[in-house]
Image: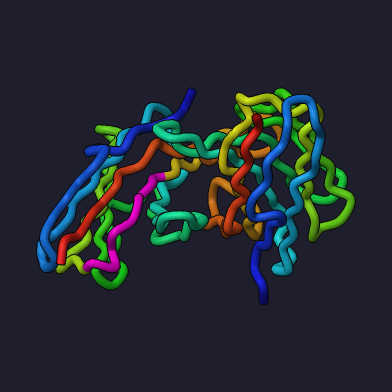
Amino acid sequence: NAGVTQTPKFQVLKTGQSMTLQCAQDMNHEYMSWYRQDPGMGLRLIHYSVGAGITDQGEVPNGYNVSRSTTEDFPLRLLSAAPSQTSVYFCASSMRDRAAYEQYFGPGTRLTVT
Amino acid sequence: SQQGEEDPQALSIQEGENATMNCSYKTSINNLQWYRQNSGRGLVHLILIRSNEREKHSGRLRVTLDTSKKSSSLLITASRAADTASYFCGQGASISSGSARQLTFGSGTQLTVLP
């Protein structure tokens, strides 16, 4: 199994541009999540999904959209990039209830918005 | 916010010594999970302890949980240079917020093991 994969690894955007961060998992996990990690802030939950067709907001959802058309994929869209979205983004998946089972994290996407 | 905190923020020890990190949280939990993050990588799950457990072991790791004090500790015995990483605790909520229960993380402890 490849586990959780994320693309791209690095990305530089100009303010106002849009882009999609890709996330895929091959473990048939129901739960998928997107986090951002900023220095001194730990990981903060952006959006999550409990299954195909179901998404919900996390702690910091503004400026981001998600969709879950398949079990495997959970892309994160930045609608109009802002410097405040400069961060490292992690996608994670878990077998079932995220709060009760271990999460598997992808390697991350380092995003810089200028 | 349910976010807890790890303590200390940074810890530097010699190889062979034990390392202890603490995690405090604010609300009721179903479980507490510890993760490791090597520089530039994603988080890797280490150990999960449920709210009805008090202590759990995995290799050189020992985790304790005190729900009355809302705190947990992670002990790494006989540390190695390869243990150098950031360590995070994730608190698994006992009730749902939105469509699922939340797992929230603290800001981590940066452990440096000197050879």
Eyeballing the image, is A86 above or below B76? Answer: above
Count of marks overlaid on the render: 0
Q: Residue B14: x and y, percent?
A: 11, 60
Q: Magenta segment range?
A: B81-89
Q: As drawn, is B6 to the left or to the right of A52?
A: left
Eyeballing the image, is B58 above or below A80? Answer: below
Question: Which residue is rendered at x = 72% and y = 63% of the image?
Answer: A25
Question: Which residue is rendered at x = 23% and y = 67% of the image?
Answer: B81
- Whether B86 is among the magenta residues is yes
Question: Residue reaching furthest bottom?
Answer: A1
Q: State the quadrant of the N terminus of chain A.
A: bottom right
Who is closer to the viewer here, B70 or B109? B109
Question: Image quadrant of residue A111?
Answer: top right
Q: Residue A4: x and y, percent?
A: 66, 62
Question: Which residue is rendered at x = 57% and y = 43% of the image?
Answer: A88
Q: As drawn, is B73 to the left or to the right of A99?
A: left
Who is closer to the viewer here, A17 or A7? A17
Residue A113, can we see it?
A: yes
Q: As drawn, is B100 to the left or to the right of B19?
A: right
Q: State the quadrant of the C terminus of chain A.
A: top right
Eyeballing the image, is A29 above or below A16? Answer: below
Residue B93, can we see it?
A: no
Eyeballing the image, is A85 above or below A88? Answer: above
Q: Residue A31: x and y, percent?
A: 69, 51
Question: Image quadrant of residue B112?
Answer: bottom left
Question: Which residue is rendered at x = 60% and y = 27% of the image?
Answer: A59
Q: Residue B20: x and y, percent?
A: 19, 51
Who is closer to the viewer here, A27 or A77? A77
Who is closer to the viewer here, A15 or A21? A15
